[in-house]
Image (spheres, rainbow, N blue to C red):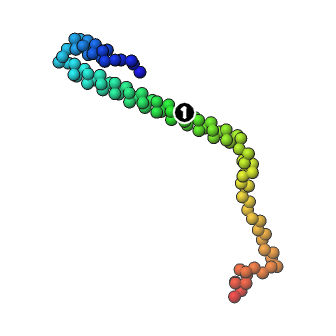
Amino acid sequence: MFDVGFQELILVAIVALIVVGPERLPRVARVAGKWVGHARRTLANVKHEIDRELKAEELKRILEEQARHNPFDTILEVPAKTQPQTTPPAESQTTAIDLLAKK
């Protein structure tokens, strides 16, 4: 990301030592490290969320495209279930229930 060499780091450390002072330098370095870590975690989370959303959009696009171009939709359509047609028994016919009732 940044092209910082050893000499630049030494220069930053010397300037920080002069500006902050030797007593407060460890505390300032610790706080700066915590902020840098927090910023990195936040950036990683944002990248992860963006990647996840892009993958979700890609999957939606693929599914929509397949739904539009799938030739098997018309072949594999399940016909509506129809009720079997039952005809009521004629009054003159004897049913099994009538035979059992007579016994």
- The residue positioned 63% from the left and 40% from the top of the image is 63
Q: Residue furthest left?
A: 23
Rendered location of residue 37, percent (x, y): 34, 27
* Quadrant assignment, res 23: top left
Quadrant that contains the N terminus: top left
At mark 1, the secondary structure is helix
Q: Residue furthest bottom?
A: 103
Residue topped by disc 1 = 54
Q: Is residue 63 visible?
A: yes
Tell me the amino acid under the disc marked 1: Leu
Query: Left or right: 93 with respect to 50?
Result: right
Q: Is residue 63 or residue 14 the one in the foreground?
A: 14
Q: Is residue 4 above or below residue 75?
A: above
- The residue positioned 21% from the left and 22% from the top of the image is 26
Q: Residue furthest front?
A: 6
Q: Is residue 4 or residue 34 the one in the foreground?
A: 4
Rendered location of residue 67, percent (x, y): 68, 42
Q: Is residue 6 or residue 72 the one in the foreground?
A: 6
Quadrant that contains the C terminus: bottom right
* Quadrant assignment, res 92: bottom right
Q: Is residue 20 visible?
A: no
Q: Is residue 74 above or below residue 8?
A: below
* Quadrant assignment, res 66: top right
Rendered location of residue 102, percent (x, y): 71, 86
Rendered location of residue 101, percent (x, y): 70, 83
Q: Is residue 54 or residue 97 the one in the foreground?
A: 54
Density class for disc 1 (Cα within 10 Å; few <14, some 14-19, many ≥20) is: few
Query: Left or right: 77 with respect to 43?
Result: right
- The residue positioned 22% from the left and 19% from the top of the image is 25
